[in-house]
Image (tube, grey):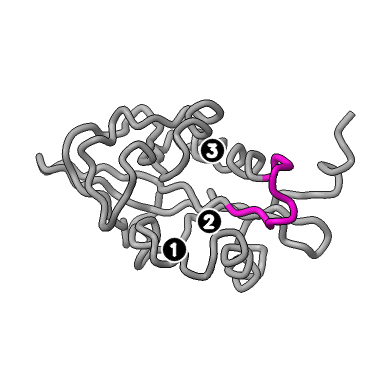
């Protein structure tokens, strides 16, 4: 029998949620200075991929959100490989530790897996490795437009590129 909480919360396309409410949730979850992080530089000039971005709602309350973004690997050898940047995954502070972030990740990854997309994120390697199969095995020589702790630069997918190259926004692309 499903738990009562899951019956009350619903996953919806993020496009069906007020964008300002998502921004307020992100501020509460990560702080108003979140725009200074390297991941935000990777998103510049792009829009979240609608089919991979979701919100978790309960009644009229926004409990969580996940957004995925088009980025690309520009290899030093001339290769251009499209990737999807997963995140941010945000959960209302009062509702953290309830598995809501995991529900959102599972939804986004299932949608990405249906399209056989290669993914990357910046996050906790123990958590994202154990539960979602992300690893830093291919990312050691990747360059980002800002600081990053190397062990937190993770990827997942059959076509994830290895070798030296720069990660940047994929501005005019549909994943």
Task: Establish if 60 lies above or below 13.
Answer: below
Find residue 151 and report its horizontal and vertical position in percent: 35, 36
Q: Residue at x 51, y 53 (%)?
A: 88
Q: Is residue 141 magenta?
A: no
Alpha carbons under labels 1 and 3: distance apart: 18 Å
- Asked whether disc 1 touches disc 2, contact meaning CB atoms under 8 Å apart, the reply is yes
Q: Residue at x 70, y 52 (%)?
A: 56
Range drawn in magenta: 90-100
Q: CA distance from mark 1 to mark 2?
A: 8 Å
Q: Secondary structure at mark 2?
A: helix
Q: Is residue 83 above or below residue 58?
A: above
Mark positioned earlier in the residue sequence (3 or 2): 2
Decide whether residue 92 is among the magenta residues. yes
Q: Position of residue 8 (x, y in %)?
A: 85, 49
Q: Residues within 10 Å of mark 2 (few under 14, many from 20)?
A: some
Residue bearing mark 1: 47
**Number of numbered tags placed on the structure image:** 3
Which residue carries the number 3 mark?
Answer: 109
Identify the image quadrant of residue 163: top left
Please tell me the numbered disc located at residue 50.
2
Q: Is residue 175 above or below residue 92?
A: above
- Which image quarter: residue 27? bottom right
Q: Does 47 sit above or below residue 13?
A: below
């Amino acid at each position: 029998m499903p738990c009562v909480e899951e019956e009350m919360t619903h996953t919806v396309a993020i496009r069906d949620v007020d964008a300002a409410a998502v921004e307020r949730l992100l501020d509460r979850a990560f702080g108003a200075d979140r725009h200074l992080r390297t991941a935000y530089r990777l998103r510049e000039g792009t829009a979240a991929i609608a089919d991979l971005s979701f919100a978790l709602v309960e009644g009229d309350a926004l409990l969580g959100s996940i957004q995925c973004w088009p980025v690309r690997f520009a290899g030093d050898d001339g290769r251009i490989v499209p990737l999807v940047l997963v995140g941010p995954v945000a959960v209302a502070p009062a509702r953290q530790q309830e598995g809501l972030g995991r529900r959102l990740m599972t939804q986004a990854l299932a949608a990405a897996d249906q399209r056989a997309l290669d993914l990357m994120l910046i996050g906790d390697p123990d958590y994202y490795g154990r539960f979602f199969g992300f690893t830093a095995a291919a990312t050691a020589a990747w360059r980002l437009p800002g600081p990053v702790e190397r062990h937190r630069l993770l990827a997942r997918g059959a076509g994830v590129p290895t070798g030296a190259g720069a990660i940047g926004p994929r501005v005019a692309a549909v994943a």
